[in-house]
Amino acid sequence: MSDRLVVNKTYKQFIGGAFERSESGRSYPVSGAGGELLANAVQGSRKDVRDAVAAARSAQAGWAGRTAYNRGQILYRVAEVMESRREEFSAEVARAGDGCSHEAAAQQTTAAIDRWVWYAGWADKFPTVLGGANPVAGPYFNLSVPEPVGVVGIVAPDEPPLLPLVSRLAPVIVSGNTAVVLASERCPLVAITLAETLALSDVPSGVVNILTGHRNELVSPLAGHVAVDSLDLTGCDAESAADAARQAAATITRVVSASAAERQWADESAQSPYLIDAFCETKTVWHTKGR
Amino acid sequence: MTDDLLSNCRPILGRVTDLLAVQTSAGSADAVAGVRITPVDAVGLEQRAASLCTRSIKTSSKAAALDLAIRVMDLTTLEGADTPERVQALCTRARHPDAADWSVPSVAAMCVYPELVPVAAKELADSPVAVASVAGGFPAGLAPLDTRLAEIAWAVAAGADEVDIVLNRSAFLSGRYQKAYDEIAAAKQACGSAHLKVILETGELGSYDQIRQASMLAMVAGADFIKTSTGKIGTSATPAVALCMAEAIRDMAEQTGRAVGLKLAGGIRTAKQAWHYLVIVGETLGSGWLTPERFRLGASSLLNDVLMQRAKLLDGRYQRREDFSVD
């Protein structure tokens, strides 16, 4: 009897709720801390960016149209599903990039799960905190309401591979935005495993799309895409962030990047309702007061 | 030749052929021996259509294809809620599809319901854009024949340059080919100098063989164009159906020397679909068919996608659908 061959997972991109190879058919090797081959990841192309933005665009109105309570439930559900796959996440985090101890990886996984729960709780509260009734002179109600900007492009930081990704993604989608995420080029595998949990967590198709591949190929078409409304360039180095910001300026796309405090990923400073606000537009409505 | 004679128990293929043999030799001074209708190899047809749709078109070829797609487009609005104002607005788009860029060519025709023909004719009077009208009891084609013919004549009198009628599928599918044929011939007469397009509604014909036979029947009966669909049923133009009809047109041209046009309609929404069809027609019928005189794409939402792809080509950025007009 022959030895059994191991059945390895193919890490595919997550676009419009489906796991797909690149339109270009390319892939690139991803290695772990010891230089060993972990897997081949999809090397996405600008057309994959286009498809992902189209998927995010068509999912946005429906996602924003859900009740805040329902969005909160769904984010909480992501945490539940991650919790049930905690061991798998920890193992993947431990072997990704420069690697870390299993203990540190488990801590990071716990923090990532808790971060989903934290933002899930904000879903139906941030409009009250960030908006509200404004006192105005005259017989009017004047109300400010934060509304999602639309489609947000997120360039995820490289390391550590899981917690920063969740820390940047959760505040974007909790308000009703949809996201196109460029996963870390060096540690893309954990992001795809996260996509698998999202696919099982009632997150509607197209709300989160995760692409893998080379940054120098993907950031520019994402930043220049007219249908992208805001960009989180936390994962870009200074030079490519400046390039992306120039591209974004031509189509009046808002650019956001994590502050030094927000980059203390394990700390409470990395989570804030103001991060939800960064991807919202405030709508102010005047309404006559009845007599 | 009577319906009784036609509806004997010979294979269906023979019967349409017999009818057309009699009609072509009777109707033509050259005494054409009659067109042959060969059976369709359905697997081969679908395989070839699929392979033609994998053709990659880039840069300057893509720019040319996008402009051609606009030039052969019948911009269509066939809603019960169409108003004169809406038709006026669409006529403006038909002349200059992109208000900001007048280098974009005009579409071939504006296609409306008969009641709105006078509006379109007035708007497009001094433009190269033709006015097309559906008529003849569109979309079922089952109004009394007199009423259908009167509707066609009315639309032409009101200013329609082109008339889109439907094949009587009720007659065709029940084997009353003579009736289907005679109705098209009568419609052609009612059209006068206007061009006649015959919609086969291929989604209701059931097989590629039936589509080829219906194509031949419509062409011999006098159609200037044969057209896939009304757009009013679920199944509309597909690459294989387009190829099937293009091959029928090619057979017709080879056997009788008459060049009939092809109009594809229904479900064509993206620029990519449009250039796939351009490839199918170009490869099957030659570039002589890639003109508004012999090829049309009937569509309503296609124009926006073509303009969006055109903008992407010029600008280099992927565009946003909302930046293009709603209609």
Image (spheres, rainbow, N blue to C red):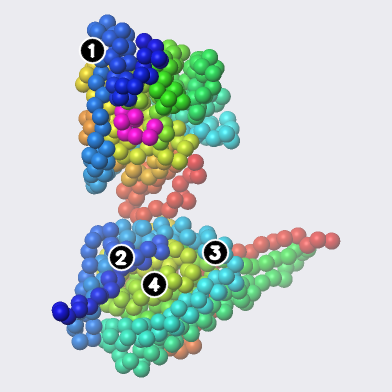
- Asked if marks 3 and 4 fall on the same chain, the answer is yes
What subunit carries mark 4? A
Instruction: Spot the residue most to the top.
Output: B29
Q: CA distance from mark 3 to mark 1?
A: 67 Å
- To which quarter of the image does residue B253 belong? top left
The residue range painted magenta reads: B205-212
Mark toward the viewer: 3 or 1: 1
Dot 2 corresponds to which residue? Answer: A218
- Label pair 4/2, CB-CB below 8 angstroms: no
Label 1 amino acid?
Ala
Residue that carries the numbered disc 1 in the rendered image: B33
Magenta stretch, overall SS = helix
**Mark 3 or mark 4: whose residue is earlier in sequence:** 3
The reply to whether label 4 and label 2 mark residues of one chain is yes
Q: Residue furthest right?
A: A291
Task: Look at the numbered disc 4 and give the secondary structure of its residue.
Answer: helix
Queried whether the magenta region covers residue B209, the answer comes back as: yes
Residue at the spot 55% in from the left edge and 74% down from the top edge = A73
Which residue carries the number 3 mark? A64
Secondary structure under the numbered disc 2 in the rendered image: helix
Please determine whether, in this image, residue A112 is positioned above or below residue B67.
below
User: Circle 1: is it few (<14), some (14-19), or many (20+) Cα within 10 Å?
Assistant: some
Residue A154: horizontal and vertical position, in percent?
40, 70
Residue that appears at 25% across and 8% down: B31
Amino acid carrying mark 4 in the image: Ala
Q: Residue furthest toward the front? A: B9
Measured as percent of width and height from the top left, residue B25 is found at: 28, 9
Could you tell me how far apart the alpha carbons at marks 3 and 2 are, in whole angstroms? 26 Å
Residue type at mark 2? Leu
